[in-house]
Image (cartoon, rainbow, N blue to C red):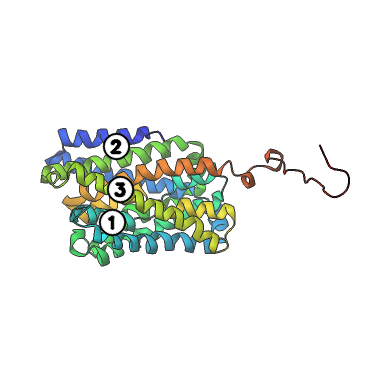
Amino acid sequence: MPIDPYILLLLGTVGLAALLPARGTGADVASGASTGAIAFLFFLYGARLSTREAMDGVRHWRLHVTVLACTFVVFPLLGLASRGLVPVFLTDPLYQGLLFVTLVPSTIQSSIAFTSIARGNVPAAICAGSFSSLVGIVVTPLLAAALLGGSGGGFSADSVVKIVLQLLVPFVAGQLLRRWIGGFVARHKKVLGLVDRGSILLVVYTAFSEGMVQGIWHQVSPVRLAGLLAVEAVLLAVMLVLTWYGAKGLGFGREDRIAIQFAGSKKSLAAGLPMAGVLFGAQASLAVLPLMLFHQMQLMVCAVIAKRRSHDPEALPSQERPAAPERTEVGTGGRSA
């Protein structure tokens, strides 16, 4: 399970923020640039999602309800249950960050990629990730207000408005302009990837710079980080098992179960980072840390699962499937050698 090179860039960005944090005017410029980059990213998401894909996905409404229930009901319940791990495994600030992870919407790009590798229902994964991101723009701040309370920092009606303006409005604008720019965006997928990764790096630098300026990193020790990793590993394992076998219990076929597992067990770094910046303010870096760790963990684990799912006999074309063993007839003649 190799480390994603992008995670090295994220770690390098954290190191840069520790050595050269943005201050004063520089902090204002970095914050404005990260806000604009995230808005442009969601604009591209809107321009990429075709009406046909959206309609294909709407037909699988049971699948989307299942993914949303996993993302915004089961995940938060597990997050609340982890409260009992404070203070043995987690400090209270790290627990608040972990709980925030459970409130974040699902991913779009990695859900699609892993579903495709595993030969699952790709159109459903596209729409499940998109619908989760759109619902999360409103639901995540509301859940944060209800579950995090005052520890969420700056939650207010103004926070919801900021998140809507930064994420939902650009997405809708992309959908409206898709008729004219959709083809260009489809032909230049690398641009979307660069904007995706670049915008996240900007948000990480801004959040960790503010954390350095505020002097909050003395609250985290290596032992606490190890405890956080262990808790997140258990959380991810539980969700992967629940989404796979729960979808089977609900009567979904193999392709739909794959989409549910990958869309219902992951959390979006692109959507979560700007929300953390708005909701947590100066404490955003501690909220971002659990999300960054969970993001890398889910990529590594889901990459292995997707690869194995792609080799399932029922996933292969009929000509590539292993032949069934021939039955040996007995009782029709003499004893065989």
**Considering only order in the chain, which callout, 3 or 2, is on the residue closer to the N terminus?**
2
Q: Position of residue 224 (x, y in %)?
A: 20, 47
Q: Which residue is mark 1?
A: 100
In the image, which is nearer the foreground, mark 1 or mark 3?
Answer: 3
Q: Looking at the picture, which amino acid does disc 3 mark? A: Ala
Residue 111 appears in view: yes
Q: Quadrant of residue 317?
A: top right
Q: Looking at the picture, which amino acid does disc 2 mark? A: Leu
Name above or below for residue 136 compared with residue 41: below
**Considering only order in the chain, which callout, 3 or 1, is on the residue closer to the N terminus?**
1
Q: Which residue is mark 2?
A: 10
Mark 3 Cα within 10 Å, few/some/many (few <14, many 20+)? few
Q: Nearer the viewer, residue 304 or 266?
A: 304
Q: Which residue is mark 3?
A: 230
Q: Quadrant of the N terminus?
A: top left
Q: Position of residue 96 (x, y in %)?
A: 23, 56
